[in-house]
Amino acid sequence: MTDREIIDLIDRSIAGEFEIDPEKMTPEKTLFQDLELDSLDIVDLVIVLEKAFRFKIREEEAIRNIRTLGDIHSFVVRKKNELEKPA
């Protein structure tokens, strides 16, 4: 899966789950202010991403720094690349 495919899947998954206009799905959008998600939505967001990418999102320092859609893109791309590296 390419980085672009990962980003597209993230955007589609979030837009579908939270009924957000796909036109609003740009990397600089903030989760709380621009996309109007709340703390309960973030729990759902984690579940949506875990289902879409088939990996667990654990309590990691990187998660605490996520503020924008672009931050989510970077986090998931990095996580997928780490998991796909040969052992």
Image (tube, rainbow, N blue to C red):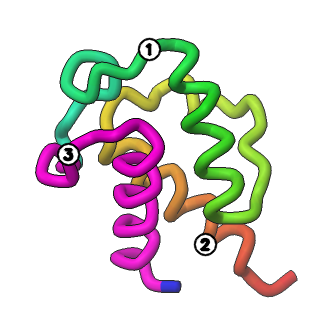
Classify 10 Å Cα crowding around label 1: few (below 14), some (14-19), many (20 and above): few
Instruction: List x then y, in percent, for residue 32.
Output: 32, 18
Nearest to the observer: residue 82 or residue 44: 44
Q: Could you tell me which residue is drawn at 68 percent across and 41 percent down? A: 47
Q: Quadrant of residue 2?
A: bottom left
Residue at which label 1 appears: 38
Query: Residues in magenta?
Result: 2-26
Q: On the picture, is 4 further left or further right than 52?
A: left
Mark 3 to mark 1 CA distance (whole Å): 17 Å
Q: Quadrant of residue 12?
A: bottom left
Q: Amino acid at mark 1?
A: Asp
Mark 1 to mark 2 CA distance (whole Å): 28 Å
76 above or below 81?
A: above
53 above or below 5?
A: above
Marked residue nearer the N-terminal end (2 or 3): 3
Q: Residue 1 bears which disc, if any? A: none
Residue at which label 2 appears: 81
Classify 10 Å Cα crowding around label 2: few (below 14), some (14-19), many (20 and above): few
Marked residue nearer the N-terminal end (1 or 2): 1
What secondary structure is marked by label 3?
loop
Nearest to the observer: residue 2 or residue 45: 45
Q: Could you tell me which residue is drawn at 54 percent across and 56 percent down? A: 76
Q: Amino acid at mark 3?
A: Asp
Closer to viewer: mark 3 or mark 1: 3
Residue contact between numbered discs 2 and 3, judged by CB atoms under 8 Å: no
Nearest to the observer: residue 31 or residue 36: 36
Marked residue nearer the N-terminal end (3 or 1): 3
Q: Amino acid at mark 2?
A: Asn
Residue at which label 3 appears: 21
